[in-house]
Image: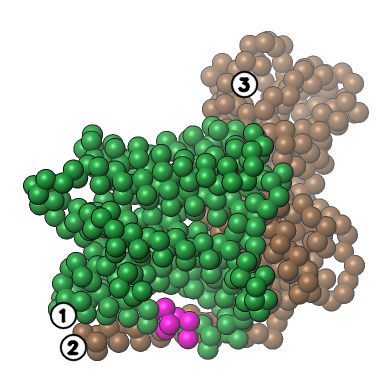
Chain colours: A green, B brown
Amino acid sequence: MTDTLAPAAQKSGPRISGAFHRLLAFSGLIALVVVFSLASPNFMQTQNVLAILQATSVNGVLAIAATLVIITGGIDLSVGTLMTFCAVIAGVLLTYWGLPLPVGVVGAIIAGAVCGTISGTVVAKLKVPPFIATLGMMLILKGLSLVISGTRPIYFNDTPGFTQIAQGSLVGALIPALPIPNGVMILFAVALIAAFVLGKTALGRYTFALGSNEEAVRLSGVNIDRWKIAVYSTAGAICGVAGLLIASRLNSAQPALGQGYELDAIAAVVIGGTSLSGGRGTVLGTLIGALIISVLANGLRILSVAQEWQTVVTGTIIILAVYADILRRRAL
Amino acid sequence: MFTRRTMLGALSAIAMLAATAGTAGAQDNYDIALISKGFQHQFWQAVKAGADKAAAEFGANVTFEGPESESQVDRQMDMLAAALSRNPDAIGFAALDSQAAVPLLQQAKDAGIPIIAFDSGVDSDIPLTTATTDNAAAAALAADKMAELIGGEGKVAVVAHDQTSRTGIDRVEGFVNRIAQAYPNIQVVTVQYGGGDQLQSTEITKSILLANPDLKGIFGANEGSAIGVANGKQELGSQIVVIGFDSGAAQKGMVQSGLMAGAITQNPVGIGYETVKAAIGALKGETLPPVIDTGFYYYDAANMADPEIAAVLYD
């Protein structure tokens, strides 16, 4: 289990480095939780812990999508607006066309994969740098979401069960004392699948290889374009899942939302120890990074810290986390 | 070696957090959480200033939070959820999307935390009251000023932001109804919608002016619409009377230069003040009216500098 979640450890440097980094990010998370629990009795209530997990679900899924692309040495700035686009597509299928729920779910994920494929093709075949290709895609998808929805939210009132995707609780139905929202379980499921893909499949191996030394991979006769496009498609499909989560949580597809969410996703990725230069990273780290961001936001709110200062503290923590990572690598 | 350094880093982070936490002590006052639709815009900062004023006056601890943009509905839900976990005495809330907030509002009601809606309010029966501008009355004041400036007769038009939002409906109806009731010699020839977009409102204004050469005035029903109307007037070199809504640096400049005759401003400071005051009233068991009108003013180049008016204008 731990091995599937830490493929980077085997790829780059001694095995201990990945394990230690996970420990570092994890102990940072624990430290935050301990501080907030001591500072306020309201922090460690079941209801608040569930609120934190619920707040992590969308950013966590987006961050996992971003992790895949970042490990290849690329970047995906379109994750936020792609999420929105997929939510709007679900709205069109379910509310405008009245199709059954599974069609909307599958349709949103396919829409994500298709957009990812387009981004990947632009990057791999047209040789447009990932930053530019996905910046363009971010704007295209933002515009298309507004066009398709007529700039108004699309509500899912006619699709019973849609809000259950994120807000319902299957776990709670089985164990009433543990009402973990489905959205959180979907985040964990996406994390497990992504970790498996990275650790145990050819796609995962090529994801790391592309980020470590793309030229070497090409010279060894591998069709790197194909694998690169596959990574972007997978990331797109994951954004489709995020789109369903946020739409279900809000019971609506909000077309103007999404821009700026890519930065939170990238922040979670780097706090989790994935290198922006590629070749190194873990899904577990990203998950912990996303949790650190939401624990921080929630804890500071519970302590009634002014919003201006919340932002300052969050920025400081991001820099500290990455600095700790640099210290660790220098020490090796 | 590196363990010691990272330990130091972790310790300093904890120290920093403890320091920020320390400033938030002193819990003997009422604790009121305001979740707004925005944070850094001048309008919302003015609402916050009003809330802080009431907090100081009545002895309450007030926090004020809002998402970076009015599209971030999920961020607002996270803020509301965290505010609920904090278990405050009361919550003030301006919903970005009322539907999305229903489960959390229900949670607050079940926990016995009174909710006061403010600004555009919340489409639900859970809030005890709503502190907001009476938009229909504010637009009626714009109609009175329009009638006065065009001499009580002639054709006028309205350029509004949209026909679905509460403010859009109330301002258009408030203006049109007042003209119909009080000024039989004034005719509202058309009401057009430009989505609050300056450019679109400019194009609409130009087509209205070209279609009605004898038009006397146009009412722009929100900031973007009003600026668009004034731009359209300028591009065609027309002499019509323009009355706007809200402030902002651009609109204030247009009023000052005379391009716009004047505008209605809401009272964001009053919105914040009345929200906190109502929350404290609810906690003391007072009965609250269903709606609290937070007031509005008409401003023009002559009275813009008056302290009473300048206090409610924002850039």
For marks 1 and 2, give the CA distance: 8 Å
Q: Nearer the viewer, residue A112 or B42?
A: A112
Q: Is residue B50 left or right of residue A223?
A: right
* Lower position in the chain sequence, tag 2 or tag 3: 2
Amino acid, disc 1: Ala
Q: Nearer the viewer, residue A252 or A219?
A: A219
Residue visible at 29% across and 87% down in the picture: B8
Residue visible at 32% across and 56% down in the picture: A68
Majority secondary structure of magenta residues? helix
Q: Secondary structure at mark 1?
A: helix
Q: What subunit carries mark 3?
A: B
Q: Looking at the picture, how far across and down is residue A259, in whole percent?
A: 46, 48
Where is A48 relative to B118, above or below?
below
| Magenta region includes residue A30 | yes
Amino acid, disc 3: Ile
Amino acid, disc 2: Met
Instruction: Please give the label number shown on residue A199.
Output: none
Instruction: Please give the label number shown on residue B204.
Output: 3
Identify the residue position indicated by label 2 in the image: B1
Q: Looking at the picture, how far across and down is residue A150, in whole percent?
A: 60, 33
Residues marked 3 and 1, same chain: no
Residues marked 1 and 2, same chain: no
Residues marked 2 and 3, same chain: yes
For marks 2 and 3, give the CA distance: 69 Å
Q: What subunit carries mark 1?
A: A
Q: Which residues are magenta?
A: A28-34
For the residues labelled 1 and 2, say whether their Cβ atoms are less than 8 Å apart.
yes
Identify the residue position indicated by label 1 in the image: A331
Residue visible at 18% across and 43% down in the picture: A223
Q: Looking at the picture, how far across and down is residue A293, in whole percent?
A: 44, 68
Q: What subunit carries mark 2?
A: B
